[in-house]
Amino acid sequence: MAGDGVKREAPLGVFDSGLGGLTVVRALREALPHEKIIYLGDTARVPYGTKGAATVIRYALSCARHLVARDVKAIVVACNTVSAVAPDRLRIELDVPILGVIEPGARAAVAATRTGRIGVLATAGTIASGAYPRAVSQLSTRAEVIGQPAPLLVPLAEEGWTDGDVPRLAVRRYVEPLARAEVDVVVLGCTHYPLLRPVIVDEVRDRIGPNVTVVDSAYATAADVGAFLVARGLARTAHGPCPPVQLLVTDVPATFRDAARRFLGEDIDEAEQVDL
Ligand code: DGL
């Protein structure tokens, strides 16, 4: 029982290829304000979305092992690319619950679709892995996934270039094939895309139709993580002010504070640099 209490008090570990996964932390903070969070951004090796699966798995194992060494009670894989290719391997290698972003996003998409035609915008790695079609096929025999890699949206979100002509034209190019496929749901299948959500929603509504649902897998994930912690008796019950996010990075980019504020929606003063 004392052991359970210690576990409940332990932090949640969250990791991503870089700072983009702070969009998932933002959703976790809203849904689970009492949880302590240690976030690891592999800023020295970002991006993962353009790399091969074996490399991404190797990087993911080093991130997850670092969080396990810090006694986290569970690991949330904020990165869609890692969630697409590495969770089975992480579960085999590590003795801690691993929660990804693909299944929650797929479940929200299946719940929202009426026509069964689901569009997914994600990195090239996530689309190539077939993870979203696989996850959707476990939930519905009727639904079909139309995947569209949208690689340029990652650097645009990193730069904070989230409105105006350049992101709009890029988003339009990526939405066009989804419009031709007549999807009625579009999943934001990448940590960075929620920052471009207003432009994506505009383009999706304009090109496809006013009733298309845009699913943000970060919020679906946060709801799943909350349910998981309660079911396992791992939810932190302490009240009082929300503990600040502990930020770990593998390289400190000069503009990390601006980027962290954009993705997380709150200020972070310090980041600890770690070697994996
Ligand atoms: N975190 C990645 C994802 O959600 C996007 C950035 C990258 O390519 O590393 O897929």
Image (cartoon, helix red, strand yellow):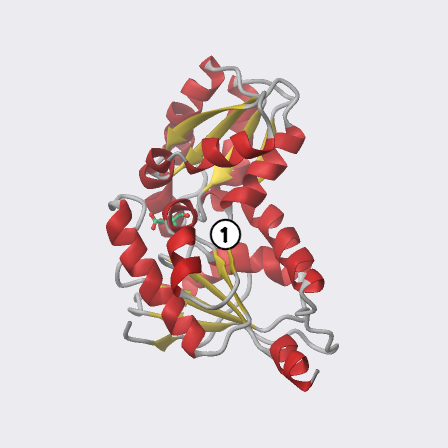
SS of the residue under disc 1:
loop
Where is residue 63 shown, x and y percent of the image?
A: 36, 66
Where is residue 15 shown, x and y percent of the image?
A: 43, 62
The residue under label 1 is 100
Q: Is residue 25 above or below residue 196?
A: below
Q: Is residue 194 above or below residue 209?
A: below
Identify which residue is drawn at 60% across, 28% down. Answer: 140
User: Residue extending furthest front?
Assistant: 92
Write down the quadrant of residue 226 in the picture: bottom right
Q: Is mark 1 within 8 Å of ligand 1?
A: no
Identify which residue is drawn at 30% across, 65% down. Answer: 253
Where is residue 12 shown, x and y percent of the image?
A: 55, 69
Q: Is residue 106 above or below residue 18?
A: above
Can see residue 46? no
On screen, residue 256 versus residue 9, left or right, reads left
Q: Is residue 198 or residue 23 the one in the foreground?
A: 23
Where is residue 121 shown, x and y percent of the image?
A: 44, 33
Which quadrant, please, contains the N terminus?
bottom right
Identify which residue is drawn at 28% across, 75% down. Answer: 275
